[in-house]
Amino acid sequence: MIHRFLLTLACLTLLAPAALASLQVPPPSDLTARNYVIMDHLSGMVLAESDADARVEPASLTKIMTAYLVFQELARGNIDLEEEVRISEQAWRTGMTGASRMYIEVNNRVKVEDLLRGMIVQSGNDACVALAEHVAGTEGAFVDVMNAQARALGMTNTRFTNSHGLPSEESQYTSARDMAKLAQALIRDFPEYYRYYSERSFTFNDITQSNRNLLLWRDSHVDGLKTGWTRAAGYNLVSSREQDGMRLIAVVMGIDAPNHQQGGIRRANESQALYSWGFRQFETHKLYDAGEVITEARVWKGESDQVPLALAEDLYVSVPSGRYNALQARMELDARLEAPVREGETYGEVQLVLDGEVLLTRPLVAMSSVEEGGLFRRLWDTVLMMF
């Protein structure tokens, strides 16, 4: 039987294909997106995917990483929403390319919050450069941080070359899976700033522009995230929907359409199809709280003969609807755990199993340290271990 549970959001194992095979209704098969992913935000488990690791142009989805790094600086107290940013000629020129812009002017001073809203709601390329220069000094230095953060988040198929996603002479790419990871991290790490993604419009310089994410008008449960388009990338959308305590993230990329209106409609339609399927076919359960002791392991040659083991993060799991009671948990511990044992180090794992298939595994870490015991204790345990 299952207790309750636990898991680390940064390193999730994907839902096993065998578990998906047990569903009565398979994932939508008529989507035109060349690449897509639908992920459970809390568990990090991918519920359905198609060519999710293919390297494709990121277009304006790049701006999600730019926002992540700005949010990070805000959270650390290095910058403030009210502080003003001087607009460089480079930022202004980026906005004059004919693509999306916020209409900022050279040498004007604009608040960080306005630039954020201009980047998120209006998809302003000029706002991206202004923020990148303000945070890192130059856009090039900011891009280096973008790529370092991508590696830290496990985005193994991503490389950025600018802060906005406009076509570049250098190779830039990402994948649907990497964008889902980034969206998950942004929602998890910066809930106080995620609210900007639900804004339907923003007015700056007496110019009002609407958010291109049509789902914000169609579905009150959708609260983000970002659209993107270039000729090479096609029409893309990273979005998120929350209902009854369950949040899903959908990424659709590479949708073809004859014009921007149809492109916007198609990416919204295909995202909705994934949400309809995901919320109907799956349910999310929290199994353990972070730090909650799950079991104790035998320690040999130590001051104590037991050490409590737990998981480092809250553990959630995604299971097919109605299958929660069939879920099983099993633990595998180090067979001969000898002192010293160090708090926070891994000494086993918990596995979640459905229909004989492992859905995910999580490391079990020591909740306290155990130092070596005295000479008699070490000798006595050595004798016991022989038998």
Image: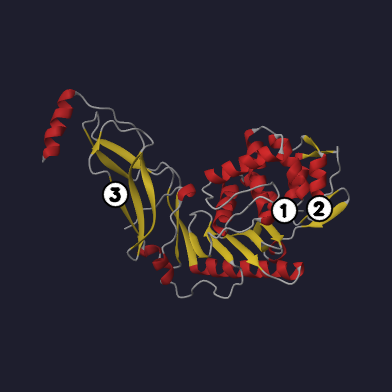
Residue on which disc 2 sits: 97
Q: State the image coordinates of residue 49 (x, y, percent, origin top left).
A: 52, 65
- Which residue extends farthest top? 375
Q: Measuring from the top left, give residue 254's x and y in whole percent.
A: 64, 65
Residue in the picture at 76% in, 36% down: 82
Mark 1 vs mark 3, foreground winner is 1
Q: Nearer the viewer, residue 338 or 56?
A: 56
Give the left or right position of residue 163, taking residue 317 as reference.
right
Residue position marked by numbered label 1 in the rendering: 166
At 16% across and 33% down in the image, what residue appears?
A: 381
Q: Position of residue 276 (x, y in %)?
A: 57, 69
Dot 2 amino acid type: Thr
Between 38 and 57, which is closer to the camera in this rendering? 57
Q: How many other residues sit within 10 Å of disc 3, few (<14), some (14-19) or many (≥20)?
A: few
**Residue 332: which disc?**
3
Give the residue drawn at x 29%, y 49%.
Answer: 332
